[in-house]
Image (cartoon, coloured by chain):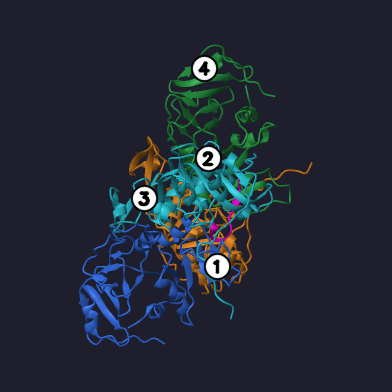
Chain colours: A blue, B green, C cyan, D orange
Amino acid sequence: MLDKKGIAKRIAQELRNGWYVNLGIGIPTLVANYVPENINVVFQSENGILGMGPFPYDGEEDADMINAGKQTITALPGAVIFDSATSFAMIRGKHIQLTVLGAMEVSQNGDIANWKIPGKMVKGMGGAMDLVASADNIIVAMMHTNKRGISKLLKACTLPITGVKCVKKVVTNLAVLDITPDGFKLVERAPGVTVAEIQEATEGKLIVEGEIPEMVLE
Amino acid sequence: MLDKKGIAKRIAQELRNGWYVNLGIGIPTLVANYVPENINVVFQSENGILGMGPFPYDGEEDADMINAGKQTITALPGAVIFDSATSFAMIRGKHIQLTVLGAMEVSQNGDIANWKIPGKMVKGMGGAMDLVASADNIIVAMMHTNKRGISKLLKACTLPITGVKCVKKVVTNLAVLDITPDGFKLVERAPGVTVAEIQEATEGKLIVEGEIPEMVLE
Amino acid sequence: MNKVVENAEKAIEGIIDNMTLMLGGFGLCGIPENCISALVNSKIKGLTCISNNAGVDDFGIGLLLQNHQVKKMISSYVGENDEFERQMLSGELEVDLIPQGSLAARCYMGGAGVPAFFTPAGYGTEVAQGKEIRYFDGKPHLLESALTADFAIVKAWKGDTMGNLIYKGTARNFNPAMAMAGKITIAEVEELVEPGELDPNFIHTPGVFVQRIFQGVNYEKRIEQKTVRQKA
Amino acid sequence: MNKVVENAEKAIEGIIDNMTLMLGGFGLCGIPENCISALVNSKIKGLTCISNNAGVDDFGIGLLLQNHQVKKMISSYVGENDEFERQMLSGELEVDLIPQGSLAARCYMGGAGVPAFFTPAGYGTEVAQGKEIRYFDGKPHLLESALTADFAIVKAWKGDTMGNLIYKGTARNFNPAMAMAGKITIAEVEELVEPGELDPNFIHTPGVFVQRIFQGVNYEKRIEQKTVRQKA
C-alpha cells in the first residue's frame, strides 16, 4: 500500500520529457518532488506562472510570488509570468500536456467530483472545472477509499461533478487504473496489495485482465 | 470650399482633451497635424500602438515601427505597444473615443461604404469593419462629391457597405453634417459655400434649420 | 492627459451603493489594498464584488464583508474566512461561483467587446444550468456571457500618469483582464512615474484602459501561506 | 526542454502540400523571413495561408505566390502586389477577406480553446453572409469561429531555448495570437538566448505555445513606406 508520497512517486513515472504540467493542490503538488532525473518538465500554476520552482529559502519569500495554493514559490530560469486570462487560454487551448488532480469521487466513465459536498460549506471550484473540461490527459491522485472505508471509484459519482468523462487514469494508494469505455482497468497493484483487495475497495466496474504487475518504485 | 487640409483642420476642432483617437488612411491622417494647442489626445494605430508620434527624421526610421498605413513612425513618451488582438480588443471594447475614417459613400441613416467597388480589384476591409461596428463616435472625412461630381451623401449606399447606422458626423469640403434619424442635418457651411450649393451636392435628405453658420478655421 | 488622483479616497469617488465592482488579485496577492481601505471607510453598501477570492477575515475583501458592505460575491473560490461563511449561510450574502478560467475570460471578453463566447468549462455540472450548450468538433461547450463592472479596481507595481501599468510576478493575475472591463478603471500602484519612464515595449496594461491612477501607501502585501525550505 | 532547431529548413520539416499555415506580420513588418525563404525553396504547394497581408511581389508571402505555392489566402488586406491580383482574377487563388480585428480575435480564440464568439464587426455587410446573428444589449453581433493552423510561423526579436519570445515595436502585431493557434508553432528570432536571460515578467509569448525555435539570418526587414520628416 502506498502513502501519499508513494502515489506522487508513481505519478511522476508518467511524466515525459518536454511536458508542461499542472499540479493540483494536495497529493498532486508532491509530484514535483519526484521528477525522474532524465526528464525535463515545466510546471504551470494557473494563477500565472510557467516554470515554477521550489519554495524559497526562509527570509527570501516574496508576497508577489505565489502558486495557486497561495504558497510562496520561486521561479526557475526560463520561467514566465502571465495573467489569469492567458493562463486559462493555455489550459483551455490544450497547451498543457498533463493535469494531476485530487478527487473525492471518480466514476467508471471518467466523471470526477472534487469541488462540493452538499450540506457542507461550498468554497468553489477554483480552476478545477476549466482544467478537467479541457485537459486531454488527466491523472487523478487520491486514496482508494474515504476515511469511512467507502470506495471513491464508483459506478457513478454521488457528489456534484466537476467534469464529465475526462479522467484518463487514477493512481491511488492501492492501484493504478486506466479509465476505459468498459470501466476501471486495473494496470498495476501497489506493493503488497492483492487484486482481491483492490476489487473489494472498488465500487465501480473493475476490469482485471491477466496477471496484474506490482508497481516498481525506486 | 475646403481642401483636404481644411477638412482635417475642421475635424481637429472636434477633439476633446484626454481622448484616444484612431485616424484612418488619407485625409484622417492629416488631423494629427492640427490638434489644438490646449488639447491632449493619444493616437492609436490599429497595428499595435497608442501614442503614435510624428514621422522619424530621415535616417532614424525603424522597420519595426510602422503605422496601419505601413508608414514609418515614432513613439511619444507614454506610448505603449501591443499586439493585434489587444488592439482590436480596445476598439471592439469601445475604449477609443473617436474614429475618423474616409468613405466612398455615406447614407442618410449613417451607413458607410469604403472598402469595395464591384468590378474593381478588392483589397480588403483591413480594420475598417471592426472600427465602424464598434466605435460610438465616428466622423467621416471626405469630399462631398466624387470626381465625376456625383454626391457621396446618399439616400442609401450603392456600394457594398462597411457598416450600418454607425456614422455620426460627416465633414466634407463643403459642409459639416450630423447624421440624425431624419437625415443629414446641416451644421456648418465651408467658407464661401452657400446652402444651395450644399443642397445641390447632397443626394440624401438634407435638413436645413434656421441660419447655418460658416465654419471658423484659424 | 493626466489621470492622476491624489489618493484612494479621491479614486473611489463616484462609487455608490449597489454598484458592481471588479477587484483584482488572487488570494491576497495583487489586491488593491488602498482602495479596499477607502471603500471600508466610505460606508458604501450593497456592492456586488467580482473577484477571484473574498479575502480573509481581517484583510482584503474580508474587511468589506465584516462591514456588511457586500451584497453579492462573484468568485471562483471563497470561504477562507468565517464571516463570509456566516453571511452566506444566513442568506445575507449572495454568492455566484464561476470556474476560474471562465471568470478570467468573461472579464477579458467584457473589456474586449465580445458579449458572449463558448467554453467547455462546466459542461455537465451545475454551472451549466440554464446555459446554451453547443457542440464544436463533437465536444460540448457552454455559452458564457462577458462581465463588465461600474468600476474595476486594480493594483499594479508601477504605473505612469497616462495609466500605463506594469505588474510584478504573480501579483499580475486577474488585474489586466479586469482593468479592461471597468466602465471606470482605477489603478493603484506602488510607484507612479512620468510618461516615458516605462518602456513602451513592456507594458502589461495599456493606459487606454485606465481612467484614474494614484500611488498607494503602506502596502502590507500579506502572505497567506508562507512556505519555505531550509538552507542545506 | 530544448526546442532549438538548426535553421529554417529544419524548422519547417513536416509542412506538406495542402496544409494550413499562419504567418505573423503586418505588411512586411515582423514577418518570418527565414521560414518564408525555406518554404519557397521547399516547393510545398497548395498552401492555405492565414496572414493579415500577402506581401509584395518580390518579398514576404508574395514570394510564395510567385512560386504558385498558395491555394488560398485568409487575410484582411491584400493586393499590394500584381501577381496576387493576377492569380485572384484568374481564379487560381482563392481569397477569404476577414475584418482585421476578427482575424486577430479568431487566431487568439483558436489558441485559447474558445471555438466561437460573438462580435459586432461585419454585421449588415457581406461578411455576415451565412453567419448566425444574435443581439446583445440591442446590438447585432455575428458568431465567428476560431482559427487554428497546422503550423503557425512567427517572428520575434529575442527568444530563449524554451521558446519564450519578446517582440520589438509594432513588429509584434499578429505574431502573439498566431503563436497560440498553431498545432505546431515555429518561432524565428533575431537573437536566441539561454533560459534565464529574459526577464520572466516581460515575456510576450510564453514558451508553452512554441514548439520549435531558431535564430534567423540575414534579416532584410524591408520598409514598405519610408516616411520621414526633415530636421528643422
Respond whether the residues carrying marks 3 and 1 are from the same subunit. no
Work out whether B40 lies above or below B58: above
The span from disc 3 to disc 1 (Cα, nearest Å) is: 39 Å
Secondary structure beneath disc 2? helix
State which mark lies toward you, 4 or 2: 2
Badge 3 is on which residue?
A: C88
Q: Which chain does the numbered disc 4 sit on?
A: B
The disc label shown at residue A79, or none: 1
| Disc number for residue B200 | 4
* Residue C193 in view: yes
Tell me how far mark 2 sits from mark 1, CA to CA: 41 Å
Mark 3 neighbour class, 10 Å CA radius: few under 14, some 14 to 19, many 20 or more: some
* Cβ–Cβ under 8 Å for marks 3 and 1: no
Q: Which chain carries label 3?
A: C
Query: Do badges 3 and 4 share one subunit?
Result: no
Question: Residue C61: x and y, percent?
Answer: 48, 50
> Disc 3 on helix, strand or loop?
helix
Secondary structure found at label 1: strand
Residue D215 vs residue C67, the one in the foreground: C67
**Does residue D98 show up?**
no
The nearer-to-camera label among 3 and 1 is 3
Between A89 and A1, the one nearer to me in the picture: A1
Give the residue pinned by disc 2: C42
Mark 4 residue crowding within 10 angstroms, few (<14) / some (14–19) / many (20+): few
Residue D178 locus on image (x, y percent) = 48, 57
Gap between marks 3 and 2, in whole Å? 23 Å
> Is residue D222 shown left or right of residue C104?
right
Mark 1, Cα crowd under 10 Å, few <14 / some 14-19 / many 20+, is: many
Q: What is the three-letter code of the residue carrying label 4? A: Glu
Q: How far apart, in angstroms, are the residues tagged by discs 3 and 4?
A: 69 Å
Three-letter amino acid code of the residue under disc 1:
Ala
- Would residue A145 be counted in the magenta stretch? no
